[in-house]
Amino acid sequence: MSTETQLRAIVENPALSAAQKARRLALAAENLLAYPELDAETQAALDARVICDMYEGAAPYRPRYLLPDFSVVLKRGSEFLELPAPQTFDEALHTLQIAYHHTPSITGMPVYIGRLDELLAPFCNDVSDGELRAKLKLFWRYVDRVLPDAFLHANIGPTDNRVARAILEVDAELQQIAPNLTLLYDPATTGDALLEMAIGNIAACNKPHIANHSIHAATFDARGYGIVSCYNALPLAGGSATLTRINLRKVAEGSRDEADFFATQLPRAIDLNFRLTEARVNYLFERSGFFESFLVEEGWVDKDRFTAMFGVFAMAEAVEALQAKASRAGRYGHDERANALGLRISEALAGAVEARPVKHLWRGRAMLHAQAGLSDDKGLTPGLRIRYGDEPDPVTHVLALARQHKFYPSGVSEILTLDETVRANPQALTQLCKGALASGFREFTANVAGADLVRVTGYMIRLSDVKKFNEGLGSRANTTGLGAEAADLTGILERRPRVIPHEFVSREN
Amino acid sequence: MNSSRAKISRVYPFSVVDGPGARLAIFLQGCQFRCAICHNPHTQGICDDCGLCVPACPRGALRLESGRMEFRADLCDHCDACLRACPIDANPMAQDMSVDDLLALMRRYRPFLEGVTVSGGEPTMQLKFLAWVGQGMRETPELQGLTLFVDSNGHLPESGWRALAPHFDAAMIDVKALDPALHRRLTGFDNARPLASARWLKWAGKLYELRAPLIPGVTDTDAALDALAGFVRELGADQRLRLNAFQRHGVKGEAANWPAMTRERLEAAAARLRGQGLENVATPSVYLG
């Protein structure tokens, strides 16, 4: 397709809003530029999608993820934006609303809107609980309608406080896609009451996520961290310059055997992905001019606090491929040996990422990340997750993967899918969360099934399947019917809780 | 060290429907009752090593070895073809497990648990084993704080409950029908023992929940509901009563043709029971209609 045709197709696409067209035109224009220079080997691996740049664009002109320290503008105002320091709760919210429009990310919208309870606490003294809720409700509606992006993320916690509580109340009431929400949880400071309130919200609307604060706090420094976009943990007042990723399935499939994978193919893919990362990081820091912005001058972000996320995905398929090459049957997520192989891969990745200095980055290093997928990753499981439809019960699920989490400081997530009987027993969900975090999970996300899928005394079944089954009851007695039913039930078992990951994005995002 | 063993049909590490909080559910194999409405009939019988299920398994996970059934869990994909092939409602996948095996599982799952529930089948058919499990839990430091619940058909005589009492925290007892004739029709047994079990457990402070299966036109008639309300009031109006909606999934035989319980009908029954003074009536969160 010629450039003209391609641009024309965007302009004339009736399904896109003007703003969406503008965004796509910008990306198309960016991609007319030459890519940051890559050597031939790296280019070939990128073309073959063994490594991947997430289609971020050919000329990085802003960091992928930006985590501004909004306390700066709330305390001092902004000379550049001609904003005085806010004095009241209303002024604080108003200042934040303005600030969000000046904090870009790869999506064109902010991915981080702050640890809101901590930011707003100084302005709340004269605000009643009722006013707090009413004002936050308008603020929440503003965020969802003006910045409608599910990657946009608010944080609360780890202390139990009235702003955090009001936010949870408002969030459960409105059930919007934006902002996404994470409660930073620390058993020592958060307390059971706030956790239980958050768990009640999960049962109602699958939000918030619960982050393992003590693990994250120890990974970062005194300036702090934030959880943004899809479960990414990054330095506050900084962020991530870029996100690149290795398709572990392709690396495994291209290996002769396990030994070749560990000795040659994986180290090679890691090296190539580093070269891709470095090319993009260097362009952003040395050519883009981003760091000459007022955000740096006024101290919203610090040029030295940006890492690069070194992503991997399709661990499940990689382990399966290596198991098959070794003629072993055990499945990832179910078999001790398969899980141990996954752990060994993670260990190798973490060692390699930690060993390689990268210019410009926070602490001079990239950070390993279990990348949660793109919408066109067909047949590839995000990050380290167990293949969808093949998950064991949630406790076995947690125990299968918990040991890997420590290797992924910039983020790793599993989605635990629970049938809706748990709604009548939120206490159990709280215990699952505590157990997962105590076992080393960096982050807890649960998805409570809507209506179709339930566990009955040990089995998962789909209500719609049962309905069909019941309707065909007359033919159940004959053997043909039983055979069909067996196939059907096997099918049911292969279609265990179905998850539509919230983080699935189109290429353009 | 305790190597006393029992037939375990299945262990489920995250049960949210077998008592309060998150529980390890241990389903023991074998039940005296032959309930028409049982939706896990494969937990009733005890495998007699007949081998009829071996050719039914598409994965080769079952074989007869020196006259004994052997099951390879690593090959099984839970298609349940063996259960359909079994002529005596047993489960060739049931595993022999020792008290120590179960205690090891509890330690493994401890961070995720508030308690353990033994269910079945009818767990009290392996009474001594239950007592060992309860005693083992008390004597294991890492398992302190976990409660042990027993989910029972109530057929155990009072002497049995007395013997088990020091070793468990509370029980859930089925009250399938107050009318003895109907109870016999539904289960094959009289209801005197289940009712006596409920009374004794209440007296002992160990009755967590009564469970009543509501079957349209069978156990949800006005007369049946009123009798149920009377029995619960006798124990105490605040006694927790859980209503289960009859559904046909897994049910074999005559009851597979009975109509399933609907939400509307069950809510009406719950309203009638509450109207008669019952203060703690729990209804299902899910209906399979």
Image (tube, rainbow, N blue to C red):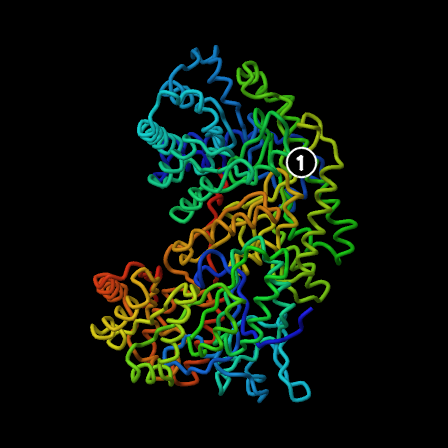
Please say whether residue A59 is visible from this viewpoint.
Answer: no
- Disc 1 packing (10 Å; few <14; some 14–19; many ≥20): many
Which one is in front, B185 or A489? B185
How far across and how far down the image is residue A236, in percent? 57, 27
The image quadrant of residue B1 is bottom right
**Number of marks in picture:** 1
Vertical arrangement, residue B120 with respect to residue A149, above or below = below
Vertical arrangement, residue B288 with respect to residue B60, above or below = above
The image quadrant of residue A443 is top right
Which one is in front, A333 or B188? B188
Vertical arrangement, residue B95 with respect to residue A134, above or below = below
Give the residue type at disc 1: Leu
The secondary element bearing badge 1 is classed as helix
Which one is in front, B83 or A20? B83
Which one is in front, A113 or A184? A184
How far across and how far down the image is residue B235, in percent? 33, 67
Q: Judge from the rendering whether residue A42 lies leftward or rightward of residue B55; answer left or right.
A: right
Vertical arrangement, residue A105 with respect to residue B242, above or below = above
Q: Judge from the rendering whether residue B208 lies leftward or rightward of residue B233; answer left or right.
A: right
Q: Residue at x 48, y 78 (%)?
A: B159
Q: Which residue is the site of mark 1?
A: A276
